[in-house]
Amino acid sequence: MHRNRSKSRCRVVPAPCGASPKPVSPRKRSLAALIALGAGLPLVLGAWESHGTGTDASVPGLTAPATDFSKTEEGEDKPGGGATSKASVTNANAFSASSGNMDFKRELDFKIGNAIFRKNWVSAPASTDASDGLGPLFNSRACQNCHLKDGRGHPPFTKGIPDDSHSMLMRLSVPAKTDEEKAKLASHQLNSIPESTYGGQLQDLSIQGHKAEGQIKIDYKEKPVKLAGGETVHLRVPQYSIVNLGYGPLAPGTMMSPRVAPPMIGLGLLEAVPEEQILANADPDDANQDGISGKPNQVWSRENNKVMLGRFGWKAGVPSINQQAAEAANGDIGLSTTMTRSASGDCTESEKDCLDAPNGNSPQYQDVELGDDLFKLVAFYSHNLAVPPRRDPADPKVLKGKELFYSIGCASCHKPKFVTGEAPGEPHLSHQLIWPYTDLLLHDMGEVLADHRPDGEASASEWRTAPLWGIGLTETVNGHTLFLHDGRAQSLTEAILWHGGEGQASRDKFAKLSKEDREHLIAFVSSL
């Protein structure tokens, strides 16, 4: 996007190129050397900040678990390494800053990507080819409408009142029946089999002249949970159904999984973590008998046409940010890209009016609706939304909470540290010591959180460990404290109490802590 403005120079002390250089006196040589050293120091220091505090060879030492909880660890205050945000963390834009060490020339790309991320798409045909192609059936008109302020989505706040943000959707699938379907699942070419009429997700909005597919209905029942010291917490147990179906009944055996949009921060850093670091934490058979058996999700890469490690999504069902962006553009907004060419989005053969509707495919944009130039910019934006710095990591209460976080076993899945590898084309994300508090692996969370819908190699009760960085700023950015994949937890305390399966032992230890210690642990998580 930018021309290289550097030109070849013949000498440090200028002489006409091609001309015989004039003799340089010893004094001038010394002066030139000092000038060069002075000019180079910022570059050296910048490279140190950009590339982190160590090299790949020292990864085990850099990522070793903490043992001293009397003080912060080196670099802990900057969870994204040199790429940590330099913006304010006191307002709703705390998740919307670019990588703190990014080349200034890339800021324009980031800002244009932000504009595309925020743009409301319109139905085709329209007066501008660069903005039409919405739907015909969709969940949102813009990426930003789901990832509110680049942060966390939520279910409807009030019973009976629709969620205007549309930051929650319902995944749909059915069990494989044919040999062909079973083969596609076995080869990882599909993570699930779409429902025959409504496709892979329910679209609750539509363009003019078309019927929406239906709406999500949630009924909550309260479940009291007693904690040590006499405190009682009331958990919301959700029951889901779909109402106002526009195209007939769902297929028998349809499986549903509600999802709120996750935060966008730090994605480029997570993608840059070498696969071997992630797989080093996998223990699918619990060989060490610690009760934790994280496993990777292996999924199909559209970009590379092969099976790769899943990293993104609530069940690690997507291998890359580019694929996540393309599939979301297609499924959520109805936009075709060169990676996902269906101009009708998630419409099925049972929704003929949707398939026959005009689309926004344009010859000047590779015969798709979201052409490669714009797609690359929005993907770059998604790679570079920065992780905010820690707040008060050296506070004694926070340090005590950190010690408790380790002692009750939370760090077994929420792995604190990784070192990124080489991020192609993005040196500012490369070789960073980062603190995401996730292992990017699947863990069985028990029946209490099961959605009864497999996704790739993730079973009905398995979920990817969610990154915790930035979680304490959720209320600042999004105005709520609703957590987990469907926003059922109304606080961090509730989110912990929902843990089952491999998280049950840590959950029970948390519930038995004194009220003061629980507050310390929550203070630590809130500081992330």
Image (cartoon, rainbow, N blue to C red):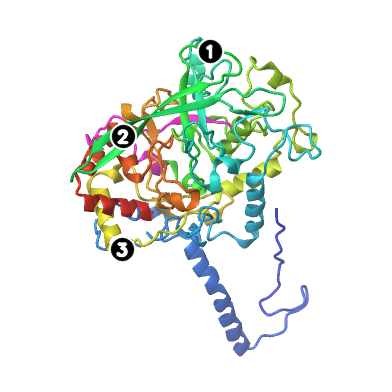
Q: Is residue 310 left or right of residue 205?
A: left
Whether residue 186 is visible = no
The x and y percentages for residue 195 are 54, 17
Name the residue beneath numbered marker 2: 283
Residue shown at 44% from the left, 53% from the top: 473
Name above or below for residue 513 compared with residue 26.
above
* Residue 297 picture quarter: top left
What's under tag 3, amino acid-wise? Asp
Q: Which residues are magenta?
A: 276-302
Of 343 and 418, the residue lying toward us: 343
* Residue 361 picture quarter: top right
Q: Circle 3 — which element?
A: loop
Q: Circle 2 — which element?
A: loop
The x and y percentages for residue 337 are 67, 34
What's under tag 1, amino acid-wise? Glu
Name the residue beneath numbered marker 3: 395
Name the residue beneath numbered marker 1: 180
Marks 1 and 2, Cα distance to the nearest angstrom?
31 Å
Of the image marks 1 and 3, the number of the one nearer the N terminus: 1
